[in-house]
Image (cartoon, helix red, strand yellow):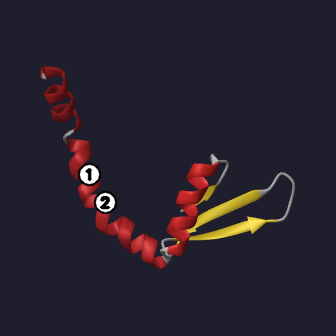
Amino acid sequence: MRAACTAAPRTGARHREMETDGLVHRQVYDELPLKTVYSLTEFGRELAEALAPLSDWGHRRLDKLAEARSAS
């Protein structure tokens, strides 16, 4: 997974935190406009794989969540 970053400064801080935690690798290209590309590390890929079932579970229940919110 690779993503070019054109995000707000606050999001950039989150990306740097994930880099510090070893979840992503950051590659900065010295060109104009400045380009930063993030990619998952092996550790990040393992985490994504572990969280995928939880994400799937939540997506399958979005309708129930919406119903509960509209009922209250």
Q: Quadrant of the C terminus?
A: top left
What residue is shown at x 24% (from left), y 57% (from top)?
A: 54
Badge 1 amino acid: Asp
Q: Position of residue 5 (x, y in %)?
A: 65, 53
Q: Are marks 2 and 1 in contact (CB under 8 Å)?
A: yes
Q: Position of residue 34 (x, y in %)?
A: 80, 56
Is 55 placed left or right of 26 in the picture?
Answer: left
Q: Is residue 54 above or below residue 23?
A: above
Q: Quadrant of residue 53 in the image?
A: bottom left
Q: What secondary structure is marked by label 2?
A: helix
Q: What secondary structure is marked by label 1?
A: helix
In this rendering, the count of numbered labels is: 2
Q: Nearer the viewer, residue 11 or 1?
A: 11
Q: CA distance from mark 2 to mark 1?
A: 6 Å
Q: Quadrant of residue 68 in the image?
A: top left
What residue is shown at x 30% (from left), y 62% (from top)?
A: 51
Q: Which residue matches tag 1?
A: 56
Q: Nearer the viewer, residue 67 or 21?
A: 21
What residue is shown at x 29% (from left), y 53% (from top)?
A: 55
Badge 2 amino acid: Ala
Q: Is residue 24 above or below residue 12?
A: below
Q: Quadrant of residue 69 in the image?
A: top left
What residue is shown at x 56% (from left), y 61% (from top)?
A: 15
Is 55 placed left or right of 48 in the picture?
Answer: left
Q: Position of residue 66 (x, y in %)?
A: 21, 29
Residue 5, numbered circle: none
Q: Nearer the viewer, residue 38 or 12?
A: 12
Residue 52, numbered circle: 2
